[in-house]
Amino acid sequence: MIQESDLIASDILYEWLLRRGDTALILGHRVSEWCGHAPVLEEDIALANIALDLIGQARLWLGYAGEVEDKGRGENELAFLRDAWDFRNVLLAEQPNGDFGKTLMRQFLIDAWQDALLSALKTSANERIAEIAVKAGKEVTYHLDRSSDLVIRLGDGTQESHRRMQAALDALWPYAGEMFSADAVDEAMAAAGLAPNPQTLRPGWDETVGEVFKQATLTQPQSDFAHKGGLTGRHSEHLGHLLSEMQFLQRAYPGAAW
Amino acid sequence: MKKEWPLWEVFIRGQHGLNHRHVGSLHAPDAEMAIRNARDVYTRRKEGVSIWVVPSAQITASDPGARDALFEPATDKIYRHPSFYDIPDKVGKM
C-alpha cells in the first residue's frame, strides 16, 4: 500500500512523477542520439554517460509513477507504450539536438533547473522522492558543472563558437519559462510539502545562468515569452518523431526482451 | 594553428592506499578538461577514487633501441633478488 496517499491524491502524485520521469527520459534519449556522432571521442563518451544517467533517473521516477498509478504498468510500459499526448516532459527536453552548441545549451538550461529542483526535493516529506533526489542530485551536479564549463569555453571561445552559442541561447530561451510554471498539480505538491513550487526556483536559476552567460560573454535574451504545454501533454511536432524511434522495438515486437 | 587537442596521460588510483596507475591517454584542451574527460572515459565502472593527468609531451621515455644496454645487464645477476636467504620462522610472513 502506498502510504503517501495520506499526503496527496495519487493521481496528482502520478502526474507530478511523470513530469520528472518523462523530462529525464526524453532528454536522455535526445542526448543518446549523439552516440557515435560527437565532435571528439572524449565528448562522445561523456554524452553517452550523461544520457545513461538521465535514463537511469527516468527509470526511478517512472517505476515509482507506475506503483502510484497502480494499474500494473511499470517503467517499461510507461516509457515505451504511451503516445505523445500522454508524455509530461518540458518542451525544452524534446527540442532537436541541432549542432553541438544547441545540444549543450539545452543541457545547461535544464541542468541548472534540475540541480535546483533536486536539491529542494532532498527534503521532500515523501521519502521515496527524497531518496531519488539524493541519487540523481549527485549526477546532475556533475552534469551542470560540465555543461556550464563548456558553455563558458565555447561562448568565450572563437568567433564561430560564440556565434553558435548565442544562436542556441536565442533559439532555446523561449522554452526556459515552462520549467518554472506552476499549475494545480504543483500547488498541491507544494502545499503537501512534497515538492517546491517551481516558481520559487526561478531566482536561483536566473542567478546561476546569468553568471555563466556573463563569463561566456553571451547576451541573455530579455523576452519573458514562454512556450508551454509539454507538462500537460501538448507537445511540439518533434516529440512524435522522437517516440517513433525510441519506441520502435516495443511497437514492432510487443513484449520483446533481452 | 594546430587543430588537434594535446594528448594527456591518465593515472587512476583504484583504492585508497594504492598507487596511481597509468590507464591510458586522451585528448583535451587543458588540464581541467583532461580530468573531466578522464572521469568520463576511464572511471565509468567505478575504477577510481583519484585521477592524475600529465601532458604526454612532459614525459621523457627511455629509448626502445637502447633496451639491451639498459636492461640486459640485469638478467644474469639473480643474486640481486633477496631469494638466497633462509628466513627464520620467527620472522613470520615477509
Image: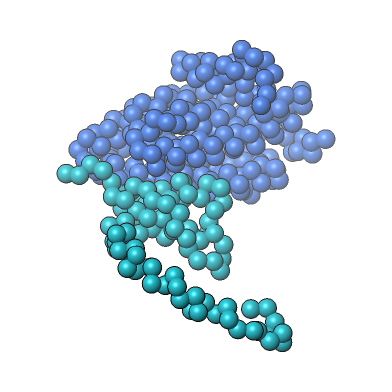
Chain colours: A blue, B cyan
- Taking B54 as reference, is A194 left or right? right
Left or right: A182 with respect to B74? right
Instruction: Residue A159 in the image: state x and y as whole percent.
Output: 19, 38
Q: Position of residue A249 (x, y in %)?
A: 59, 18
Q: Position of residue A186 (x, y in %)?
A: 60, 33
Picture layout, residue A225 above or below residue A204: above
Q: Is residue A228 visible?
A: yes
Q: Residue at x 34, y 63 (%)?
A: B67
* Picture residue at 66% right of the left edge, 42% below the top: A129
Q: Is residue A214 visible?
A: no
Residue sitting nearer the eye, B42 or B76:
B76
Q: Which residue is at the front of the view, A10 or B63?
A: B63
Image vertical order of residue A43 relative to residue A234, above or below: below
Image quarter (top left, top right, bottom left or bottom right) of the C terminus of chain B: bottom right
Residue B74 image-quadrant placement: bottom left
Instruction: Give coordinates of residue A47: x percent, y percent.
Output: 45, 37
The image quadrant that residue B77 belongs to is: bottom left
Q: Where is A138 relative to A81, above or below?
A: below
Residue at image location 32% in from the left, 59% down from the top = B64
* Quadrant where the image shows the N terminus of chain B: top left
In this rendering, the answer to whether B15 lies above or below A96 is below
Residue closest to the far front: B76
Q: Residue furthest right?
A: A1
